[in-house]
Image (cartoon, coloured by chain):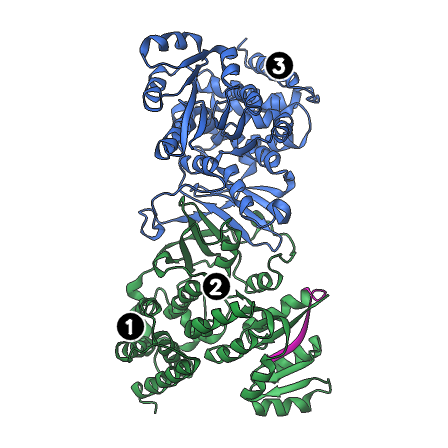
Chain colours: A blue, B green
Amino acid sequence: MQKKVLVFGSTGSVGRNSLEVIEKAADKFEVVGLCGNSNIKEIVKQIRKFRPKYLCLKDKGSANQLKKRTKIKFKLFSGKQGLEKFSRIKSDVSIMAISGIDCLKPLLINIESSKRIALANKEAVVTGAKFIFPKAKKYKTKIIPIDSEINAIFQLLNLTESGNKEIDKIYITASGGALLNYDKKSLKKVTAKRVLKHPTWDMGKRITVDSATLVNKGFEAVEAHNFFNIDYKNIEILLHRQSLMHAMIQLSDQSCFSCIYAPDMKKPISYALFYPKRMKLPKIDLDKEKNKYSFSYSPIPYKKFPLLKIILEAGKRDDNSLVVLNACDEVVVDLFLNGKIKFTQIEETIKKIFENYPSKKIKSIGDIYKWDNWARNKTKEILGEK
Amino acid sequence: MQKKVLVFGSTGSVGRNSLEVIEKAADKFEVVGLCGNSNIKEIVKQIRKFRPKYLCLKDKGSANQLKKRTKIKFKLFSGKQGLEKFSRIKSDVSIMAISGIDCLKPLLINIESSKRIALANKEAVVTGAKFIFPKAKKYKTKIIPIDSEINAIFQLLNLTESGNKEIDKIYITASGGALLNYDKKSLKKVTAKRVLKHPTWDMGKRITVDSATLVNKGFEAVEAHNFFNIDYKNIEILLHRQSLMHAMIQLSDQSCFSCIYAPDMKKPISYALFYPKRMKLPKIDLDKEKNKYSFSYSPIPYKKFPLLKIILEAGKRDDNSLVVLNACDEVVVDLFLNGKIKFTQIEETIKKIFENYPSKKIKSIGDIYKWDNWARNKTKEILGEK
């Protein structure tokens, strides 16, 4: 029998990649629901191909337009409340690829009705890990990370005889993003277009900017800590420009095992769908590959990436700092992408907010939204955008 | 309780490394027997340190001398028959590091009396796999390869959920040996001293020469085929100069997993001793290592290494060819090391014998020795050494 799949964020980069994987394994998976934001053109294509029973567009206007664009029947949800209802649909697998903190609520709801969640979103884990994982445990919902590095760790840990018991260290690799070799002066002038040219990965916009500041890598360390219950002191980040080796584990005898594949999100997505099995794909001959595989890695130049240190420091504090930093980052990256601020102001603003936020415990989901909101306002205030 | 260990070939490179590992884990392992050839100085040191109950020196003269050199009591075996008796001693783990085909008989005997054999020797597997593995199965003796590449595959396969069921390919890496960048003309003049300067590994003499001709790598493919029942067409060899990544497996979704550690035989030895657990060793910070880890791999230049193709071809034939080639290689390498022939004559002679040997099935251990003997004589005949 086919497994019923919901795709949250189906028109984004991960969503589209997920649907490509599902298309190739149509005998095993059936798309029952698609959820997008406002990209009608893309969603109409997807509807024609997958004929889902349920559809959700967060943007109400787009939802109204959509009705006029297709005669295919489906149940349509829209708006925030519509998204919450859509999140209650029962599924075998939900692919969660809504970007930003907007993913948190659908995720928390969907844990109750899905058997497995393939989670691409980082921000929900960064801000709400303490609510997500206990709830998943309670509902016996398996959350599998799709984020390539975290997925690689998940794969590597699944491979070891005793899970994470004999792990001495985990290495997450970082490409260093689009601006690794830029000096301070050039960083001031760098355009959004330039930052969005990632050397190895083709991804969404915010994550590509976050890759250039290494905020993204800091978030991955937070993910690794929360997914696998591994102490921050045993999580290392290595600079690895080629994005071929996604993670590495170091066992008690100091032997290392790494997970290697060409940078393509379809790999971790298919693993999350097929786990504990694997998709059967055409055999690759590495020795006949055009690009000779060549890896290198070296220490991260932390001085060049102060935001990475800040995120790691925040990870260790059990307070509202990650919520605040995530919200601030979301706002500044958005302003940068819209040409409102310089690239260097991303770092300046996040630094400023980290120095000045009032440290408070997060005790409820409400606290997350409260501090998220506080940080958004504070960020705009700092930048004089209010 | 400590596990009882026999070390065959204790004065050689692998033997000495094994004793170093055992010394560090003296609470877990007790050396009950040591077996060497003629290096009295080394064996006396080892006797003083480990106080084994049993000792064996294959060379009878050396055995007689040994008695005079120490007052420590032990039961001494010597000569071929002595070695056979020594091989019948019961043990929890036997480390088999006798070099050449001389290892075959002790191995076949020891399978009956040891629970686990950590096997460093290649030649026994290359010549006698069809007798070794069924016998090990019958006596429920676990044979664990110590040869670094094969050990790495063993580790990687142990890590996968379903053993070798979902393996698409296995990659064995080759450093390319000491002479990778030599042209034909320089190869004619190369000295044994030069060949023995391996770029990454510190090993015994024959294996170091075999690394320069890639005969060693061919033998490893034969080992991999026999240890893991993997078809030759799914075994690839990759050139990887740094000897950090010892093997890689490629699963059905084309993700790869590799086993990485600095080239040091103590790693695979300790894994074979501690399996399925791992030795606890001091934590290494890869990002603080002096040598930045950098890997590359590329296709093997097969044209440069015709002997590799020959060994792989022989592996596919189910006849006496591997026995013949191994014996021929053992003789020519010995002659080269003793300055009797040129380096290029190794290749010439092995080619000649492969073109002219009579292809016959190996039906008994006796057949192995018969063809081994035939090839030794034939080799000397070809070289006019008889």
Label 2 CA crowd tier, 10 Å (few <14, some 14–19, many 20+)? some
Depth check: give the residue in front, B63 or A343.
Answer: B63
Residue drawn at the location 45% of the way across and 61% of the way down: B228
Quadrant in which residue B223 is drawn: bottom left
Residue range corresponding to the magenta coloring: B25-35
Q: Which residue is mark 1?
A: B185
In percent of width and height, residue A251 lies at 59, 51
- Circle nearer the N terminus (1, 2): 1
Q: Place residue B128 in its image quadrant.
A: bottom left
Rendered location of residue B72, percent (x, y): 73, 84
Tell me: B215 left or right of B269: left
Which residue is drawn at the image coordinates 67% and 19% (left, top)?
A: A364
Residue B360 appears at what percent x and percent y?
A: 31, 78
Residue behind mark 2: B200
Q: Position of residue A55 (x, y in %)?
A: 42, 16
Q: Nearer the viewer, mark 3 or mark 1?
A: 3
> What is the three-letter code of the residue carrying label 2?
Thr
Residue at image mark 3: A374
In three-dimensional space, the C-alpha distance between marks 1 and 2, rounded to whole angstroms, equals 24 Å
State whether residue B272 is above or below residue A292: below
Quadrant position of residue A269: top left
Q: Is residue B194 above or below residue A281?
A: below
Above or below — where is A247 with respect to B50? Answer: above
- The amino acid marked with disc number 1 is Lys
Q: Main secondary structure of the magenta part?
A: strand
Label 1 or label 2, whichever lies nearer to me, is 2
Q: Amino acid at mark 3?
A: Trp
Same chain? Circles 3 and 2: no
- Please give the chain letter of the residue carrying mark 2: B
Q: Is residue B32 magenta?
A: yes
Give the secondary structure at mark 3.
Answer: helix
